[in-house]
Image: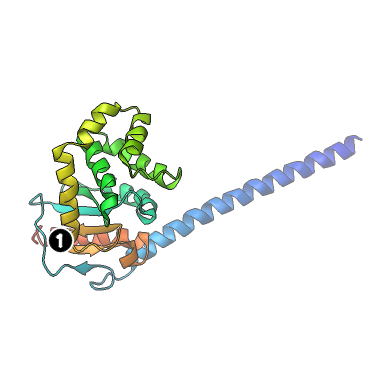
Amino acid sequence: MVWVLSRLLSSQVIKEKIMISFSKRIFFLSVFIFLSATASAQGQKIEEGFDYRVLPVSQPVETKGKVEVIEFFWYGCPHCYDFEPELSAWVKRQPKDVAFRRVPVAFRDDFLPHSQLYYALEAMGKGDALNEKVMYAMHKENKRLLTEPEIADWVASQGIDRNTFLATYRSFAVVSKARAAKQLTEAYRIDGVPTIVMQGKYVTSPSIAGTKAKAIAVMDYLEEKIRKDKYRQ
């Protein structure tokens, strides 16, 4: 009996060691694949016309003497939601001479409430805290957030006073910003999202570059190019 128990325990220990070893191999393989993909994207040649394009007419930048980066996005875009983790990580590691901002895109008039929602949250100082939550609500919880009551209900569920939000959402400043964003979208000739525009003229995106990792590599490349050109347009 003792011999049998000993064999069983020994067998169990061996199985556990095998499982732990297998798990470690899977983990390290995953890390290797991720790092290889990133290194590959960074090591690839970056070419104008393939990985990024240059606008025929440059648009004025808001901040002189800095690298201006604009993400044109839409809350309801699944590709924007998918690109968000990589883009946020990129933004966090940028130095002080990089000025990043987002511009909400409304390709149809019935999407304008999303632009108003973005600028209302920004005006209330809640944009950084809630932008990702808005996208999560739309893409994971199937909320459309297209009508004012639906938007107000969701915002209130996040602990924000409903009346205060509605006053901001309906304000002249927020409505004007949403309309101006639509005009800016047209000026930059944005035909899809997410799209990154740097220094008012360099345009790239995961779809243009081919992958999210390559798009980030292109952004790094253009950032250094803009610095070398002394922030000129």
Q: Position of residue 214 (x, y in %)?
A: 34, 63
* Kind of residue at disc 1: Ala
Q: Position of residue 27 (x, y in %)?
A: 54, 50
What residue is pinned by disc 1?
187
Is 95 positioned to the left or the right of 153 in the image? left
In the image, 206 versus 224, the foreground residue is 206
Q: Is residue 69 visible?
A: yes
* Number of residues whose C-alpha sits closer than 10 Å to that of mark 1, classed few (under 14), some (14–19) or many (20 or more): few
Is 80 positioned to the left or the right of 60 in the image? right
Q: Quadrant of the C terminus?
A: bottom left
Q: Position of residue 227 (x, y in %)?
A: 14, 58
Residue at the image position 16 percent from the left and 53 percent from the top = 68
Q: Position of residue 200 (x, y in %)?
A: 14, 59
Q: Quadrant of the N terminus?
A: top right
Is 197 positioned to the left or the right of 79 in the image? left
Residue at the image position 34 percent from the left and 27 percent from the top = 159
Is 88 positioned to the left or the right of 9 in the image? left
72 in relation to 148, above or below: below
**View extreme (right): residue:** 1
Residue at the image position 21 percent from the left and 61 percent from the top = 222
Residue at the image position 28 percent from the left and 72 percent from the top = 50
| Residue 183: quarter of image | bottom left
In the image, 80 versus 231, the foreground residue is 80
121 in relation to 140, above or below: above
Query: At numbered mark 1, what does the secondary structure look like: helix, strand or loop?
Result: helix
Q: Is residue 96 visible?
A: no
98 in relation to 165, above or below: below
